[in-house]
Image (tube, grey):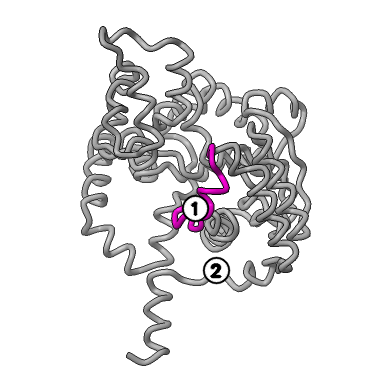
């Protein structure tokens, strides 16, 4: 096959980011990358692995390091940032990023001209995020806070974007409702609420936490016991600790630890916190945006099991935006003026 044809086919499946955005990508020096890697080795991985040095020498560890070094940033640059910019320009926009993690998303937002206020509960991750922003020469305001605390600390400020980045699923129900409601109040009129990578509890397979079918449908008391069946080695011990000879109930501390792993999110929280879900101004879902950019993806999804299941869910309650029926809730919702 001719190289030009190969390139055209690759573009149909995975198109390049818009050139106007690509021009804003900030280059990083080898010294800057070394600083980021050093921060990951010093701050991040030791808090997640008992033998971090040994893990990072393994095949999975090297893959994990590459993911944390550059691959997450590339995903946000080529997918998430263009999706947001398609709804509203990031240039000059005030952005509250909830769950910034190691700062890959922060760099992708800031290099497009956003004024980012980034929060996270994990101090080691924030240290990496600060190092990454310095290496790429972008600025952001960082706070070590959880989402509920953030809205109290930042009270009186308003934002053009408030983005929950892979964090809603790790909250309790009460925290999630409080955070969504507070974020809605802090958005400026016409501002956008972004939800990124929140696993949909209506989905038939939990690809986020347990890697088990029908798992997110189980009540918490049963799910914590069934976690012992998970093929995910880092998660199954949660269930094994909860399963006792007499099947006694898990302690409140064990249940909270379990819930923090992620139990999924659905349209019900948005309905309660923001108003009737069917009346929300959902500007876009990431899946619909990506299918619009990738014709082959649109055709493949329509014929897939996931596509058929999504259409089945929508047939049961057709007044909701289709984005509420995707495997993950990746949504942009506009607040009325």
Image quadrant in which you'd find residue 300: bottom left
| Left or right, residue 79 beside residue 91 | left
Q: Nearer the viewer, mark 2 or mark 1?
A: 1
Looking at the figure, which quarter contains the C terminus?
top right
| Left or right, residue 63 beside residue 302 | right
Q: Main secondary structure of the magenta part?
A: helix
Numbered range of the magenta stretch: 49-63
Q: Is residue 335 visible?
A: yes
Q: Position of residue 150 (x, y in %)?
A: 69, 28
State the residue lying farthest toward the bottom. 2
Q: Position of residue 297 (x, y in %)?
A: 33, 64
Q: Is residue 190 above or below residue 17?
A: above
Q: Is residue 283 above or below residue 153?
A: below
Looking at the figure, which quarter contains the N terminus?
bottom left
- Write the residue at 71% across / 32% down: 144
- Residue 51 painted magenta: yes
- Write the residue at 43% across / 75% down: 11
Q: Residues within 10 Å of mark 1 (few under 14, many from 20)?
A: some
Image quadrant in which you'd find residue 238: top left
From the viewer's side, name the closer residue of 53 and 333: 53
Q: Which residue is mark 1?
A: 61
**Mark toward the start of the polypeptide (2 vs 1):** 2
From the viewer's side, name the closer residue of 265 and 241: 241
Q: Which mark is residue 192?
A: none
Image quadrant in which you'd find residue 213: top left
Q: Which residue is mark 2?
A: 17
- Residue 52 painted magenta: yes
Q: CA distance from mark 2 to mark 1?
A: 29 Å
- Write the residue at 60% across / 31% down: 184
- Write the residue at 39% across / 45% down: 323
């Amino acid at each position: 096959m001719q190289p030009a044809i190969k390139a055209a086919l690759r573009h149909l499946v995975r198109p390049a980011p818009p050139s106007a955005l690509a021009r804003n990508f900030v280059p990083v020096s080898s010294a800057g990358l070394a600083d980021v890697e050093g921060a990951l080795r010093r701050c991040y991985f030791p808090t997640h692995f008992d033998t971090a040095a040994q893990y990072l020498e393994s095949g999975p560890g090297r893959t994990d390091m590459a993911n944390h070094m550059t691959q997450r940033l590339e995903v946000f640059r080529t997918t998430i940032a263009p999706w947001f910019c398609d709804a509203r320009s990031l240039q000059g926009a005030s952005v509250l990023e909830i769950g910034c993690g190691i700062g890959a998303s922060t760099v992708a937002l800031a290099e497009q001209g956003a004024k980012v206020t980034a929060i996270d509960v994990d101090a080691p991750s924030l240290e990496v995020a600060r190092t990454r922003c310095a290496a790429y020469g972008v600025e952001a305001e960082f706070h070590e806070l959880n989402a509920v605390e953030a809205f109290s600390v930042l009270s009186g400020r308003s934002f053009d974007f408030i983005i929950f980045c892979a964090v809603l699923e790790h909250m309790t129900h009460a925290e999630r409702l409080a955070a969504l409601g507070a974020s809605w109040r802090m958005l400026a009129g016409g501002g956008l609420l972004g939800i990124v990578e929140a696993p949909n509890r209506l989905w038939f397979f939990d690809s986020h936490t347990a890697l088990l079918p029908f798992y997110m449908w189980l009540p918490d008391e049963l799910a914590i016991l069934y976690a012992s069946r998970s093929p995910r080695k880092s998660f199954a011990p949660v269930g094994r600790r909860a399963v006792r000879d007499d099947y006694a109930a898990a302690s409140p501390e064990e249940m909270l630890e379990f819930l923090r792993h992620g139990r999924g999110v659905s349209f019900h929280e948005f309905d309660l916190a923001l108003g009737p879900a069917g009346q929300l101004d959902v500007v876009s879902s990431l899946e619909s945006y990506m299918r619009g950019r990738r014709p082959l993806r649109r055709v493949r999804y329509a014929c897939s099991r996931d596509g058929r299941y999504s259409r089945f869910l929508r047939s049961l309650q057709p007044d909701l935006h289709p984005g509420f029926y995707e495997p993950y809730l990746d949504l942009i919702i506009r607040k009325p003026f």
